[in-house]
Image (spheres, rainbow, N blue to C red):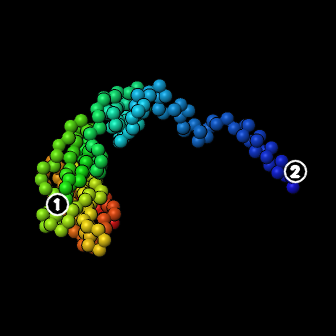
Amino acid sequence: MDMSKNIVMLAFVALLWCCNGKDTLLDLYPMEPIVNPEVGVLIDNNRMFHVDFDGRQQISGITEAGIFTTADRFRSLDFEPQPWQPAGGLIVFGKGIIVHAQTEGASFALRYSTDNGKTWATYGEPIVDERFLAVGSVSPVQLSVAADRSVWVLCQQGAGGDRRALLYRVDMEQQQCALMMEKAGATALTFDFADSEHGWVL
């Protein structure tokens, strides 16, 4: 019994000894680290918020301390110091747009940036209808940016038995919004939308 175990173990060790890694899956993976260890400024006393892969080599992103781009997977790095402005609330990153929802009083406000957070604009129209605010405060639960850059906001009103889930579609550039769904006695959990018509809500 012990002899057979030893033979199997010796065969396994011999097989590993003969394996040189050529013509195997190991050839598909780079042996050098993707991130250059000499680039330390990106992560020193900093943290990432969002990263975009613009191609096989091009990577760009937003950190707490600034905006970075690299065209060669961090072998070189362009870093532009820029303090991150949003504090608290909800944030979502879309293609070419960042949206930030912040509770204000009984409702919430939306801000957006189209230049990676360097400058921010505020959606200036009221989103929540006065008839809902008369019943109680409305809080954003989740944000989503669809492919057409429309912003969807899933909201919750009330608690316990007297609650309501609300879904709004906001066009930040046209400064238009619409209530797309109202469900009494429901708790808003999560959702996602691909465009201005197709999506799902849980």
Question: Left or right of 138: which side holds 52?
Answer: right
**Distance from Cα at disc 2 to Cα at disc 1:** 78 Å
Disc 1: CA contacts within 10 A as few (<14), some (14-19) or many (>=20): many
**Which residue is tagged 1?**
128
The answer to whether the residues at label 2 and label 1 have Cβ atoms under 8 Å apart is no
Give the residue at x 12% y 53%.
Answer: 125
Q: Position of residue 84 (x, y in %)?
A: 29, 38
Q: Where is residue 54, by image quadrant?
A: top left
Give the residue at x 25% y 67%.
Answer: 158
Give the residue at x 80% y 43%.
Answer: 10
Give the residue at x 72% y 40%.
Answer: 16
Count of numbered circles in the view: 2
Q: Where is residue 96 in the image (x, y as percent from the top left)?
A: 26, 42
Q: SS of the residue at dot 2?
A: helix
Observer-nearest residue: 39 or 109?
A: 109
- The amino acid pointed to by label 1 is Val
- The amino acid pointed to by label 2 is Met
Q: Where is residue 181 in the image (x, y as percent from the top left)?
A: 22, 67
Q: Where is residue 157, by image quadrant?
A: bottom left
Q: SS of the residue at dot 1?
A: loop
Q: In which quarter of the image is the C terminus?
A: bottom left
Q: Is residue 54 visible?
A: no
Q: In which quarter of the image is the N terminus?
A: bottom right
Q: In the rendered image of this protein, does residue 167 appear above or below residue 8?
A: below
Q: Where is residue 78 in the image (x, y as percent from the top left)?
A: 34, 27
Give me the disc on residue 3: 2
